[in-house]
Image: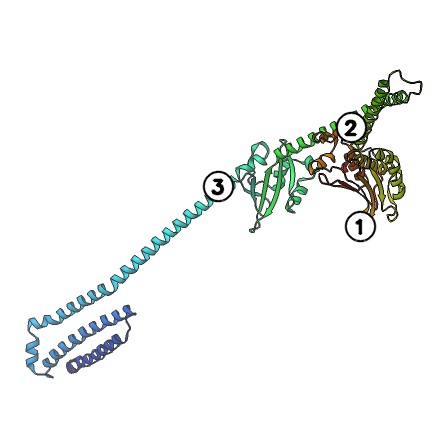
């Protein structure tokens, strides 16, 4: 033990100097490291600074006790031992340790605690901001959802959202009234086919099945359906971008009612028109029999076939009766023609019509009447125009009506021309006169049925009943042709009839 004690006594003083040298090197390394660390790495720089302080404390402590023990064992003068062993100086290492600990704590508090607190405050602010943004996002989502609900609820049509399996996800309140389920049950969760089976009267869609109706809706075609309660709805399907389906139901009950009212009104009008035509036809036939007798007997009386009258006034009266009877007969014949045209009873007997022959026939019939009124009648283009297909009696009646109207209204010295020509549309026959002409309003009225011709003072000086143009228009349309009238006041009138190259053999009521 003596040898070991002696060895320890000789090594211990030396060990302190080794430790002092080692901590000196460590302190120098810390200070060099501290100078190389940038300002951005504050935590590392603070740690190196704290370690440097601790290294300085260790260096001081080992240096103090190294001098103390070296003087104790005779390595240094004994005066150092006596000086350092005083009670006041022995407390110095403890004070250095305490001071170092305080400095380290102050550095840590100054460097780290504020950063931790700052980070904590930043984290708290970030959490608060995140919660605020989340609350705002939720509020916006709630507002948008409310606006969306308000929007679909304000739609006048029923709207339903269905998933990819065609089950109802949501509807607006309007859908519950337009396309309700049985017994007022909710349709949420119902399959589309089950819903349609409950709500629709399938007789209104040709007795289709619910599956067939659903397939038709999915094709995009709108479908009008009658519901079990008697109302009507139009169903329309659209597919959304999210593979959901949108069903729109529009209440068309009012439209259907108006449509039925219009159909009923049209039926009543057609029945009334047919009744009117039948009445006119019957009355015309009933009137023609006594009129023929009146005309015949008045003709015998005015020609004095059974002896001269005792007074000349009797012959004048007979002439008046004869003229009035013929005029009334013409009116009745016109009414009969209109009644036939409106009722669709005109049948065409088509045959080739020679322009020269029909022109000669018409001018021959009306030549004397025109000559008596001082008018010249001529026909043109008959040699260059080919024959055309038409009903001969109808063509004859149309030309007699047009030329007769021209004779009635053209003053003495005027001219009446019948022109035939070949056009791309077919054969045209034009009747021109140098009469007083007409306004556009008069032309429009005279080409309409008799019901509105009383708006025009066409029967000037008892020269006509105003039905001639209307009859001509109906007869040319029976040939699938057309009539055009061009006229200006004091510049005469031109009526052009166009006969197509081919016509139908009979008149169609719908075309009238």
What element does badge 3 sit on? helix
Q: CA distance from mark 3 to mark 1?
A: 63 Å
* Marker disc for residue 424: 1
Q: Position of residue 88 (x, y in %)?
A: 7, 71
Of circles 2 and 3, the one toward us is 2
Q: Position of residue 467 (x, y in %)?
A: 77, 32
Of circles 2 and 1, the one toward us is 1
412, above or below 80, in the image? above
* Residue toward you, 236 or 2: 236
Locate residue 298: give its quadrant.
top right
260, above or below 110, in the image? above
Specify whether 127 is left or right of 15.
Answer: right
Q: Earlier in the sequence, mark 2 or mark 3?
A: 3
* Residue toward you, 467 or 181: 467
Q: Is residue 212 visible?
A: yes
Q: Is residue 354 visible?
A: no
Q: Counting other residues with Cα less than 10 Å from the Cα at mark 2, is it few (<14), some (14-19), or many (20 or more)? A: many
Instruction: Look at mark 3 in the image and give the residue it sits on.
Output: 150
Q: Earlier in the sequence, mark 3 or mark 1?
A: 3
Q: Earlier in the sequence, mark 2 or mark 1?
A: 2
Specify whether 388 is left or right of 154.
Answer: right
Instruction: Look at mark 2 in the image and give the residue it sits on.
Output: 277
Q: Position of residue 324 (x, y in %)?
A: 82, 24
Residue at horizontal 85 percent and vertical 18 percent from the top: 314
Locate residue 437: give its quadrant.
top right
Specify whether 244 is left or right of 504.
Answer: left
What element does badge 2 sit on? helix
């Amino acid at each position: 033990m003596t040898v070991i004690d002696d060895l320890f006594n000789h090594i211990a003083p030396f060990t302190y100097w080794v430790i002092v040298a080692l901590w000196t090197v460590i302190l120098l390394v810390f200070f060099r490291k501290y100078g190389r660390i940038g300002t951005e790495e504050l935590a590392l720089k603070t740690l190196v600074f704290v370690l440097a302080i601790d290294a300085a404390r260790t260096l001081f402590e080992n240096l103090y006790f190294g001098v103390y023990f070296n003087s104790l064992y005779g390595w240094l003068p004994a005066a150092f031992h006596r000086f350092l062993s005083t009670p006041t100086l022995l407390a110095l290492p403890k004070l250095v340790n305490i001071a170092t600990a305080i400095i380290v704590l102050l550095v840590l508090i100054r460097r780290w605690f504020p950063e931790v607190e700052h980070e904590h405050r930043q984290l708290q602010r970030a959490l608060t901001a995140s919660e605020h943004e989340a609350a705002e996002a939720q509020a916006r989502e709630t507002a948008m959802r409310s606006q969306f609900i308000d929007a679909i609820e304000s739609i006048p049509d029923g709207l339903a959202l269905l998933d990819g399996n065609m089950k109802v996800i949501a509807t607006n309140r309007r859908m519950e009234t337009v396309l309700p389920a049985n017994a007022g049950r909710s349709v949420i969760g119902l399959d589309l086919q089950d819903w349609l089976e409950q709500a629709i009267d399938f007789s209104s869609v040709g007795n289709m099945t619910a599956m067939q109706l659903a397939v038709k809706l999915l094709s995009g075609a709108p479908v009008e359906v009658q519901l079990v309660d008697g109302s009507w709805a139009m169903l329309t399907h659209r597919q959304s971008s999210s593979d959901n389906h949108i069903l729109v139901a529009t209440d068309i009950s009012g439209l259907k009612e108006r449509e039925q009212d219009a159909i009923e009104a049209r039926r009543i009008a057609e029945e009334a028109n047919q009744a009117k035509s039948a009445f006119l036809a019957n009355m015309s036939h009933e009137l023609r029999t006594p009129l023929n007798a009146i005309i015949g007997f008045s003709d015998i009386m005015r020609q004095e076939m059974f002896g001269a009258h005792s007074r000349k006034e009797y012959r004048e009266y007979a002439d008046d009766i004869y003229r009035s009877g013929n005029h009334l007969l013409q009116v009745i014949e016109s009414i009969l023609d209109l009644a036939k045209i409106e009722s669709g009873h005109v049948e065409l007997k088509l045959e080739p019509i020679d322009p020269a022959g029909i022109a000669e026939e018409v001018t021959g019939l009306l030549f004397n009447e025109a000559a008596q009124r001082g008018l010249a009648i001529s026909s043109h283009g008959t040699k260059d125009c080919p024959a055309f297909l038409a009903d001969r009696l109808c063509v004859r009646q149309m030309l007699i009506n047009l030329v007769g109207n021209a004779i009635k209204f053209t003053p003495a010295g005027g001219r009446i021309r019948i022109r035939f020509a070949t056009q791309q549309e077919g054969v045209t026959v034009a009747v021109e006169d140098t009469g007083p002409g007409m306004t556009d309003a008069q032309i429009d009225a005279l080409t309409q049925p008799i019901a509105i011709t009383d708006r025009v003072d066409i029967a000037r000086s008892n020269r006509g009943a105003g039905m001639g143009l209307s009859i001509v228009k109906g007869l040319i349309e029976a040939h699938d042709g057309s009539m055009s009238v061009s006229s200006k006041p004091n510049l005469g009138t031109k009526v052009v009839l166009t006969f197509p190259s081919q016509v139908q053999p009979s008149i169609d009521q719908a075309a009238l």
